[in-house]
Amino acid sequence: MKSKKTSYPYLLWMLIFTIIPIGMVLYYAFTDETGSFTLNNFVNASDYSEVFLYSLLIALISTVICLVLAYPLAYRISRCSEKNQRLIIMLLMVPMWMNFLLRIYSWVLILQNYGPLDMILSAVGIDATLIGNSGAVIVGMVYEFLPFMILPLHTVMSKIDSSLIEAAQDLGGNSLYVLRKVIFPLSVPGIISGITMVFVPTASTFLVAQYLGGTQFMIGDVIERVFQSDHNTGSAIALVLMVVILGFLVFMNKFGDEEAVSV
Amino acid sequence: MKRFFSIFMCLVLVLCIVPLASCSQSGGYEGEVNVYNWGEYISNGDDDSLDVIAEFEKRYNIKVNYTNFETNEELYNILTNSNSSYDVIIPSEYMIGRLIDEGLLEELNYDNIPNYQYIMDRFRHLDFDPERKYTVPYTWGVVALVYNTAMIEEGEISGFSDLWNEKYKDTILMFNNSRDATAISMQLCDPPINPGKKSFTHEDIDRATDKLVEQKSVLKKYVMDQVFTEMENSQSAIAPYYAGDIYTMMDNNEDLTYCLPEEGSNFFIDAMCIPTCCQNKDNAELFINFMCDPEIALANTEYIGYATPNQAAFDMLDEETKNCELIYPSQDYLDKCYIFANIDNDIYSYMQEKFVKACSSSAEVSETTETAKSSPTATIIVCIILAIIIFATLYVIVYDIVKKVKKRKN
């Protein structure tokens, strides 16, 4: 009883800053300027479908790259000694102490024409524009959100009992087999939460594309821009994005539960 | 203990919301004035300049609460949607027109602003404030082109049409702001639309945005403040921007030079006004008068780099600045310029919408089709994705319920 009462302030906080704003987005998305019901906003929003798909694609690619990079790294870290683990995790966190915009900005400096990377590449004879395209946006995203993939993976993996792995090896499983049958199934919850923690923000982020990308916007930028003049259409786009992400979360959680149970 | 802690945390959270304004009770000052201005738009004491705000506080013993906005729209939203009170605001001409129309500006008492006498004649009768009741001009300027002579031969650029030139493909920057971008494209439409005219139709905006979409295939990026790093670090070759800022860029990179577009250009004015939410009108007028003081106006114009409408301050400027065509274009050139101010709300939001659509349409599409419409296939794919997701979610929920019911039966 007591614990319930003490949670009221937090519930109130949630209500004011989460439930009410979502309610407002819902309200705006289904009404026009005069406040009467309309679905027109969604028709307007459909003009941005292409940007929407582009953003989802970028988010998907970034998430996959993050996963591929983070999985071996997280595994390696989890097999280090306790002391080293803490050190490495801290090192991973250090860049996150800096403002996110500053980090993106430093990527601009690295990738720009006549920047360090461009100089090195052109010295080797490769002439390429490194900035102002989707590739640069993905690089920025991966850099930005990689820690969010590593941390949950590491948490889960460090809990895997190494005697399980040894047992599998003793019973004659080669390393690939051990990975497939022991490590991977046990790390699924980490993969699930890692993917959600990367995919969701990459799909909805803004400014990264404005700094690293060219003329192609991402959906977060579009929402920001549309909101400046038209709350209703902006809310409609935001709502569609929210539904997609929410559906994605439900699906991932479900998938995660099933997997965990079946192991 | 736990409960106290949670109550304490709650209090802390609530206190975060209470505006810090209450803390800024003027200690030892006789009054206060709330000034709302663009960022980096006042002489603030850096680089041996005069700290205008400190000077005002010293001279009149009035506390200045100085805050910044980034766009006129932000200013508008704050004025209409929040309870905060400002005494002096410095919006641009089109926003002033809108604020006057909506009755959000207070009439000034020019008797309290004797320094208004220094304002040049040319700036005393302006379209957006025809009866001269609400405004005291602060700065003005034109939109010009800045280009890098290391990439483009000097003199090769003649006007805005070069922003569409295939030759400079992928090195061209454009305004990331519907108003300035549309004004430029209007001039280049065939036949051109005069952005200075009295009213616009939806068709005008459509034509102008189509022109912008056409530009996308040669464009590198839409930028605002990023233009500084892009141009100063020689990342891009050519960009349109405000004259005062171009002057700053040229200071930082010797290769940069400017061009006053032959088509004529956007002539803009930012002016000081008092909004109706003002609570210290006397102090506000005192502040405006102070800003028109020749010494102060001189310090401001030297620091910001934008042109001053203050004759006395202008006379005190060094010869080099006075004769700079970029900052103080000749009367002949100004005659070719226009003020893009007569946009009513409906057209304005239409223009914003069209601009975002133009920006978000992909460049490949724009090469084949002329209008900035998203292809229907993309819409269909999004609809399919949505349908699948909703279906999957429902399936999961139903599946859960069925499972629970089964368990209960067992």
Image: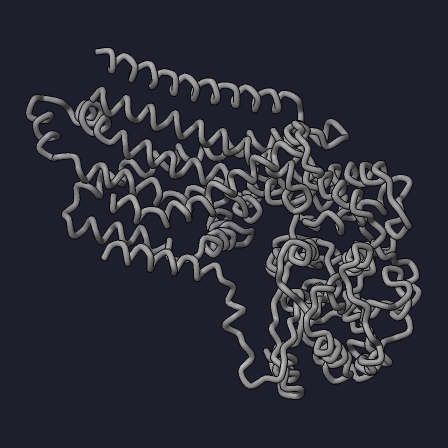
> Considering only vertical position in the picture, is A263 above or below B33?
above
Horizontal relation, residue A190 to residue B255: left or right: left
Q: Position of residue A210 (x, y in %)?
A: 57, 46
Residue B153 visible (yes or no): yes
Res B224 quadrant in image? bottom right
Callout count = 0
Horizontal relation, residue B198 to residue B396: left or right: right
Res A53 quadrant in image? top right
Looking at this view, name the residue that lies furthest to the bottom.
Answer: B59
Most foreground residue, B378 or A1: A1
Residue B155 visible (yes or no): no
Horizontal relation, residue B95 to residue A256: left or right: right
Res A186 quadrant in image? top left
Q: Position of residue B129 (x, y in %)?
A: 86, 63
> Considering only vertical position in the picture, is B316 above or below B200?
below
Which quadrant of the rendered structure holds the C terminus of chain A? top left
Which quadrant of the rendered structure holds the N terminus of chain A? top left
> Considering only vertical position in the picture, is A201 above or below B119?
above
> Considering only vertical position in the picture, is B206 above or below B273?
above
Residue in the image at 83% along x and 70% along y = B328
Residue in the image at 41% along x and 47% along y = A12
Most foreground residue, B351 or B261: B351
Residue in the image at 79% along x and 54% along y = B102
